[in-house]
Image (cartoon, helix red, strand yellow):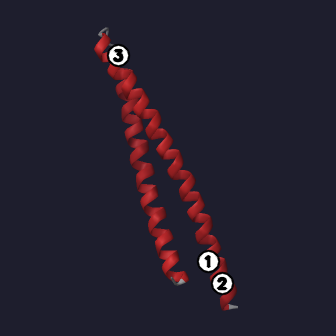
Amino acid sequence: MEKQDVKHVLQYLQSEISRIETMAGTLSGVEREHFQRLTNFDQRELVDIAVEEQSASRQLGAIQQMCQNMSRQIGGMLRSTERGADNEVH
């Protein structure tokens, strides 16, 4: 695989990971809001659902953090690839 192909693949992966990160962050916020709204009711079933929403929010937050970390790693790989291409030109 050529360096340009690797660069394009890394850029694509970084873009898609950023999309997943955004979606996870949005859904996590919705889940947190649901938790807060559901815990205002005095029904045990709704409180149980609220706890599930809170758990989902935490998991989505973890996915968001994982995506941020992967995106940073890919960014580093892209910079290394670009530096390598610059060194080959000179």
Disc 3 residue type (three-letter): Val
Q: Position of residue 10 (x, y in %)?
A: 50, 69
Q: Quadrant of residue 52?
A: top left
Q: Quick check: 88 above or below 13? A: below
Q: Is residue 86 left or right of residue 20?
A: right
Helix, strand or loop for disc 2: helix
Measure the alpha-carbon separation of dots 1 and 3: 52 Å
Tell me the distance, in whole angstroms, between the alpha carbons under discs 3 and 2: 58 Å
**Residue at left 66%, top 90%?**
89
Please tell me whether residue 64 is drawn above or below residue 81 in the rendered image: above
User: The residue under label 2 is which amino acid type?
Assistant: Asp
**Which mark is in front, 1 or 3?**
3
Viewer-nearest of discs 3 and 2:
3
Contact, mark 2 vs mark 1 (Cβ under 8 Å): yes
Q: Which residue is mark 1?
A: 82
Quadrant in the picture for the C terminus: bottom right
The residue that appears at 59% across and 60% down in the rendered structure is 73
- Which residue appears farthest toward the bottom when viewing the image? 90
Q: Which residue is mark 3?
A: 47
- Gap between marks 2 and 1, in whole Å? 6 Å
Q: Nearer the viewer, residue 56 or 30?
A: 56
Q: Label 3 neighbourhood size at 10 Å, few (<14), some (14-19), many (20+)?
A: some
Q: Could you say where residue 44 lies in the image, as x and y percent from the top left? A: 31, 11
Q: Amino acid at mark 1?
A: Glu
Which numbered disc flags the more N-terminal residue, 1 or 3?
Answer: 3
Task: Determine which residue is flagged by label 2.
Answer: 86
Q: x%, y% of residue 29?
A: 41, 36
Q: Earlier in the sequence, mark 3 or mark 2?
A: 3
Q: Residue at x 48, y 80 (%)?
A: 5
In the image, residue 82 lies at what x, y percent? 61, 77
- Give the structural element (helix, strand or loop) at label 1: helix
Mark 3: which secondary structure? Answer: helix
